[in-house]
Amino acid sequence: MKRWLKRIGLGLVVLLVLVGGSVGIYAKTQASAFDDSMSKVYEIPLAALTLKNDPDTLARGKHLAESIGGCTLADCHGSEFAGGKTLVLGPLGTITAPNVTSKGLGAAYSDMELQRLLRHGVKKDGRSVRLMPVQDFNWLPESDMVALISYFRTVPGVEKPNGPIEVGILGKVMDRKDNVPFDVARRVDHAKLEMAGAPEPTAAYGRFIGRGCLGCHGAKGSGGPIPGAPPSMPVPLNITPHETGLKGFTFEDFDKVISTGTRKDGRKLDPFMPFEALGRMNEIEKRALFAYLQSLPPVPFGQR
């Protein structure tokens, strides 16, 4: 969840507010387009899925949920999958990741429906899920998807009501301007999902893991203020091999940063950075991500 919220850019919306009377018409039109898109039913067939319960598969699934998937972060579904903390985003809306255990929404989904949700961002009723960062992990190879869902089915059910989730007018406008991806399914290429191969410590595999980084640090990875973001939002750092970024970093340096949340100079990373999940990646995944970041063109800080 946190990775998606970092992508908020308010500049375009502020300009609209300053325009004058046409803003109301524009906002209404965009909100209507958002509502229509969220009402769309995607005809995506269910794919076969066979779960496993051997220790290795379940261990891999638990690892993915706690690391690459980020499912157990407090801003997502929480350590018990029973629902995350409520994020009040002002005029954008209010978001709470739901209880997805067997005593929550998890009971309503078959294994194949759950797989479709994780691959395509499409709910049981065929409509788009809201703000779930599907594109950050829908590339997982088939064996990992089996592991993740197999582990999920072993999580104990928790009696906990779902918190509020509502997208405000401003949130709908920003979604249509591609500043905040509340409408997830319309951003997925359903006809051509790109999936990774087996995990390996290479830049090629790291490119998939890096999807969750560039949305916040910019398409070039050079960081800098998110256009139009409020002053309270932390400024993403440069993660390219530029001298204002990761130039001179060894893998050990990088590992320390993402594992402890502490920069080379001793300063702590802002808690908005999901280093709790990144630090739980195994060495192959960490080395893959580091190799990918080192393969990026070196770009000066702020040239997102």
Image: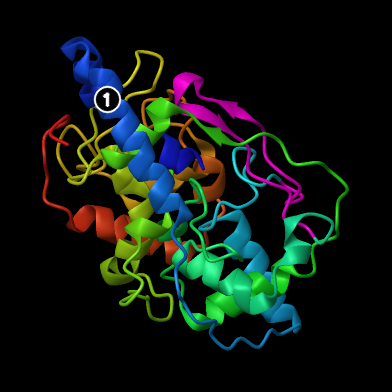
Answer yes or no: is residue 8 visible. Answer: no
Magenta stretch, residue numbers: 79-101
- Quadrant of the image occupied by residue 97: top right
Q: Main secondary structure of the magenta part?
A: loop
* Residue 67 image point, x, y percent: 55, 55
**Callout 1 environment at 10 Å: few (<14), some (14 to 19), or many (20+)?**
few
Q: Is residue 47 left or right of residue 153?
A: left
The residue sitting at 31% across, 44% down in the picture is 215
Outermost residue, right side:
159
* Residue 141 image point, x, y percent: 46, 78
Q: Is residue 80 left or right of residue 130?
A: right
Residue 241 is a magenta residue: no
Residue type, numbered disc 1: Ile
For the image, the number of numbered tags is: 1
Q: Is residue 225 above or below residue 116?
A: above
Q: Nearer the viewer, residue 42 or 58?
A: 42
* Residue 59 image point, x, y percent: 69, 71
Where is the C terminus found, in terms of image quarters?
top left
The residue identified by callout 1 is 25
Answer yes or no: is residue 177 visible. Answer: yes
The residue sitting at 24% across, 41% down in the picture is 246
Q: Is residue 23 above or below residue 58?
A: above
* Residue 274 image point, x, y percent: 50, 40
- Quadrant of the image occupied by residue 265: top left
Q: Is residue 118 left or right of residue 286?
A: right
The residue sitting at 51% across, 47% down in the picture is 130
Circle 1 sits in a helix, a strand or a loop, which is it? helix
Q: Nearer the viewer, residue 254 or 160?
A: 160
